[in-house]
Amino acid sequence: MQYLPPWGVLMLDLLLCTAAFWLSIWIGSGIFDYKAIGQAVLPFGYQYLLVMTLQLLCFWAFHSYMGILRYSTFVDTIKILLSNMITGILAVLFNLSVQLMTGSHPLLNTVLAIYVPLAFVLLFCLRVGVKTIQDWMQRGKGSPRVMIYGTKYAGVAIADMLRSAGNIPYQPVGFISDNQQRTNYQVAGLRVKMLNDKLFEWMQSRGIKHVIVSPLKMKEINPAKDLQVFIDHNISILTTPYFTPMENTDTIDAQRIGRIAAIRIEDLLERPEITINTDNLQQHLHGKVLLISGAAGSIGSELVRQVQQYHPKVTILLDAAESPLHDLTLELKSTYPDARFIAVIADVRNRERLEQIYREMRPDIVYHAAAYKHVPLMEDYPNEAVQANVLGTKNMADLAVEYGVQRFVMISTDKAVNPTNIMGASKRIAEIYVQSLFKHLQKEHPECTKFITTRFGNVLGSNGSVIPYFRKQIAAGGPVTVTHPDIIRYFMTIPEACCLVMEAGFLGQGGEIFVFDMGQPVKILDLARNMIRLAGYQPEVDIPIVFTGLRPGEKLYEELLNQKERTIPTENSKIMIARVREFDFQQVSKQVDQLLTTSRQDKPFLTVKQMKELVPEFISKNSIYEQLD
């Protein structure tokens, strides 16, 4: 079960070559009369020593004995083939040289002609035999049988590695293809089956409950749509890390393919990879001082990571949460040792502290991601929502103007459209403030700070989002709680959202509200059922689903645009500009100041009443504040 050391492999190879040499003499003796050759030929013992010396030199030159037998690949086959061929060529050249000098040849050419291919066959069979025996010993009959979805190089690499790596407990039995033409062939010795209803009957009859989706196949398909058929048939979906076409099946790291894991619900919800104009962003961000508020949060931390590829001069990490900011700083120093980061503990509600930061560090670009975001919690604390989301944005925006920031990118939410809750209304007021501030400044100072707002929906895997919540409930054995059977939400991955935020920040000329293409909405009930199935359970059988009713401020669906708004396209098809009604800054500023004063007086109903005056479309749902509408 342990690896044979190189010297052990070399001894085995020489032993097989010895057998090949004497077999060559025995085979040749039945064809030719060696006794009639005369004394010019060396005795067989000396011929053996000479050939083995040349063979040993060739083994050493090509390092054919350095490989691990059970993991032998095409490269190892080429090495032993070259070792044998060069041994034969050197022996023939030696023969010719001696014959030219003495008139006689010391070696039998017929023996060499038989020895070279025979030795190669024996050496090749040794490696194939060890691989086969090792596979049989490791797998046994208890290893789960698995099909591989995808027949290109990535799928073949997975099949080869599963059969050669003893530490991966899966036994490949075939490939799955959605191309009818490929189902008439075998790939890597395994049958290719067509993806249809008969496939699942065939898999069930053979007890196959797992499918590995090759990383290349994941790039070609729409996971949310094309893998649903496996989930519906209770087939466990596995996947591996991605590798590129430049890596052939012999050089792919076994440990990477060995990291086979169950596919996550996030992988099923991901959409085709987005493309952004990296050249423009490089020009836009290179050498700049960036300030990111809420830097330790889900969006803020990913923004910090993504901007590093454009080599800013320094990135200021502003957050009030000490421990997450500390963890992020340690990660960044390890991942980006050449980049410069400044971690700053500060609260966006504290204007004096923010002014000190702006005055000392003079940021060029600000990404404002700091906010309170949990809808039910903010419904209980409207004063705190106003202080964090409205006052925090006002402080950041006012200081950006005062200290000459070039661009200010505010991250908003789809809940700001026709808000039904405190959180959404507070973000809408923040939008109104920065947009009206820019329009006011632009009249007298065209080169003023450009304020840009971005809106998008739920972010996959963000702190407190529904997917981690469901995952904890499933791990605890259920029940999984869904507020309403018809509730739907838009989802976007954190990297995708941050890419679009950066590009929108570059595209904006000031005053725009950018909305992102959020794709198709996802029914939360379907999401819960799929997560239960992916965890290996049956919905309503192993894990119950309980409907708890809509929470305060929650609505069945989110909107990205107000009914009075329309969009215009940009050069990026994933980003649109929302045309929204404009507000007079003087009036907005006065109302916001009144709202902030009220929010400090612990009068939640009066606070919410003033919010509704600022945002007339704010109609509360499932909330005690409905009486104010």
Image: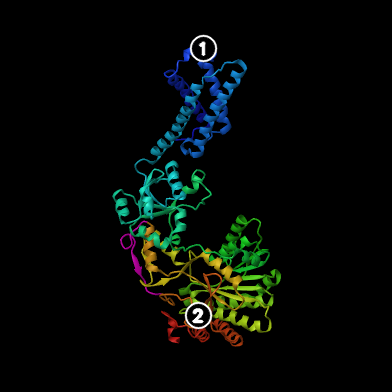
Residue 457, label in figure = none
Q: Where is residue 198 in the image (x, y as percent from the top left)?
A: 30, 54
Quarter containing the N terminus: top left
Read off the residue under disc 2. Answer: 566
Residue numbers of the magenta segment: 536-550
**Residue 296, image quadrant:** bottom right
Q: Residues within 10 Å of mark 1 (few under 14, many from 20)?
A: few
What is the three-letter code of the residue carrying label 1? Answer: Gly
Q: Is residue 598 above or below residue 14?
A: below
Q: Is residue 486 above or below residue 189?
A: below
Q: Position of residue 7 (x, y in %)?
A: 53, 29
**Which residue is at the front of the view, 560 or 55?**
55
SS assignment at label 2? strand
Q: Can residue 381 be seen from the camera position used here?
A: no
SS assignment at label 1? loop
The residue at 43%/19% (across/down) is 31
Instruction: Tell me the CA gap for discs 2 and 1.
Output: 102 Å
Task: Say whether residue 545 is magenta.
Answer: yes
What is the three-letter code of the residue carrying label 2? Answer: Arg
Q: Where is residue 51 in the image (x, y as percent from the top left)?
A: 54, 22
The residue at 39%/43% (across/down) is 189
Read off the residue under disc 1. Answer: 38
